[in-house]
Amino acid sequence: MGNNGKWNICALRRSSKASSSFSTSMKLLLSLVPLILVAVVGIVSLISPIILRCDFIGKSAFFSSFVNSSSFSSNLSLFDENEKKGIVELRSETTVEVNNTHNATFNHSSNSIQTLQQTNESYVAHQKMKQQRKFSILDRTEAGLLQARAAIREATNQTLQDPDYVPIGPMYWNAKAFHRSYLEMEKQFKVFVYEEGEPPVFHNGPCKSIYSMEGNFIHAIEMNDQFRTRDPDKAQVFFLPFSVVMLVRFVYLRDSRDFGPIRKTVNDYINVIAGKYPYWNRSLGADHFMLACHDWGPETSFSVPYLHKNSIRVLCNANTSEKFNPSKDVSFPEINLQTGSINGFIGGPSASKRPILAFFAGGLHGYIRSILLDHWENKDQDIMVQKYLPKGVSYYEMLRKSKFCLCPSGYEVASPRVVEAIYTGCVPVLISEHYVLPFSDVLNWKSFSVEVKVEDIPNLKDILMRISTTQYIRMQRRVGQIRRHFEVHSPPKRFDVFHMILHSVWLRRLNFRVHDDQ
């Protein structure tokens, strides 16, 4: 696509005019004090050292649980207590309402109201009404997010009813907080999808491959009437609808090792939307998100500095050693939909009908698998590790016969084996490094999976044998309970993988407040 627009990230600009006169009476000077204070606040905010045109809520990263495994509830405690008065403060900073008699009223205190009514009302009304029209929609959006944060914080004291599903159990860091957050998302979350860009690179993606989630999500969000809005002023987030798989297929020159064409395509696209709409520049991309399951998703985001630095990157390749930032980025699962559907892949026998202790089949693909194969390939009947299955042996039937399914990372951290294990009721054994597990802001993976360090691969059998039968049965049942969060449906169903992806984006949007200071 061409460079039809100009992306201009500039510093905040604000102009103000003031006049004074030695002949002005002391009474008029005193009456102008509130207006002067408002101007000072604006100037102070202008010169403050701000990285983005948005404020991050709390004293530290809201989603520290990605790194230190702290609970959802402890994350919620990071919200600043001043948020309890946030809606009032938000209005007092930016909002001036004009009543039917055109008397300006400042929503701060009764003294301020009386003082403002004594000033030049026509001047205040003209200037502030103009500003109110410009900011009121964004203010209402941010006020709604403040209310959602407050509701989530209070969720531990509530019992919520739900016709479909009520999260409960140790699989969740904080089941009540998650449920309340999910309901708040359903109530108010809105996504604007940019319509610019042409298929096959934009508004398109694969639906029947290891990268199927790119096409599935793009299709689902564009067909969705609940969360998609056609009015960008009503959106909390903005989706960039390009597919990295399609960029690699149609823009990248095969075997060239030249990433330039992909970078230029993404850069041109951001230029176009930033030139046509005010929203990218308003937040420097912080309320925008991209989604990629291809290994080159992180690399594609580096095409535009603010895309990888500020935007919400929804990635299968959630590798912290490759600059995945758990406090703002989203990890979502890699799902290999061979037929485009999960029909026939869901379900498996109970724990007592699984004779194999652990199973893996797969070729050399990264150093972790090399270590696994070196230690266990065809060496133990309990730990069935093979490069390739014999002819006529079903891979999915082997999963269903196994208690534990080994999920080693390949060249990249994500693996479809994790979801394959969950679909078939097999407890996942996660062997990876630097991998942020999908939806781990909500899900407590340690309650339904086993994490094995790479250096402990030689001790794999001992580690699994030490898990008691009772403990294993609990874990296997929990796998069945959280499976709904990884299922793909068309159209999507509540609490499925599509909604969990949206919920992860929603949580990150709750973590900052956008200001429109142009």
Image (tube, rainbow, N blue to C red):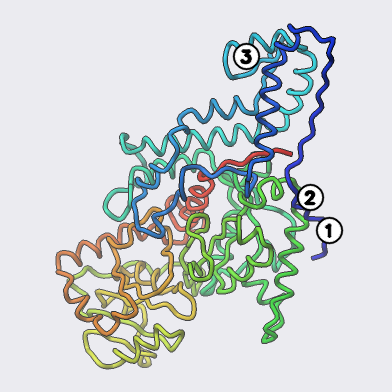
Quarter of image, res 139: top right
Q: CA distance from mark 3 to mark 1?
A: 47 Å
Residue name at image x 60 percent, y 55 percent: 310
Q: Which residue is mark 2?
A: 276
The kind of residue on which mark 3 rests is Ser
Q: Secondary structure at mark 1?
A: loop
The kind of residue on which mark 2 rests is Lys
Q: Which residue is mark 1?
A: 4
- From the top left corner, tell me how far across and down residue 369 is, in percent: 39, 85
Residue name at image x 58 percent, y 44 percent: 190
Q: Which of the two labelled residues, at mark 2 and mark 1, occupies the earlier sequence position?
A: 1
Q: Nearer the viewer, residue 511 or 403?
A: 511
The kind of residue on which mark 1 rests is Asn
The C terminus lies in which quarter of the figure?
top right
Q: CA distance from mark 2 to mark 3?
A: 39 Å
- Left or right: where 211 falls relative to 350: right
- Left or right: where 518 falls relative to 493: right
- In the image, which disc is placed on residue 112? 3
Residue name at image x 61 percent, y 59 percent: 309
Residue name at image x 48 percent, y 80 percent: 411
Rate crowding at label 2 as few (under 14), some (14 to 19) or many (20 or more) other CA atoms within 10 Å: some
- From the top left corner, tell me how far across and down residue 490 is, in percent: 51, 58
The N terminus lies in which quarter of the figure?
bottom right
> Is 169 placed above or below 472 here?
above
Q: Which of the two labelled residues, at mark 3 and mark 1, occupies the earlier sequence position?
A: 1
Rate crowding at label 3 as few (under 14), some (14 to 19) or many (20 or more) other CA atoms within 10 Å: some
Q: Nearer the viewer, mark 2 or mark 3?
A: 3
Q: Secondary structure at mark 2?
A: helix
| Whether label 2 touches label 1, CB < 8 Å | yes
> Is 387 placed above or below 419 here?
below
- From the top left corner, tell me how far across and down residue 25 is, in percent: 79, 7
Quarter of image, res 455: bottom left
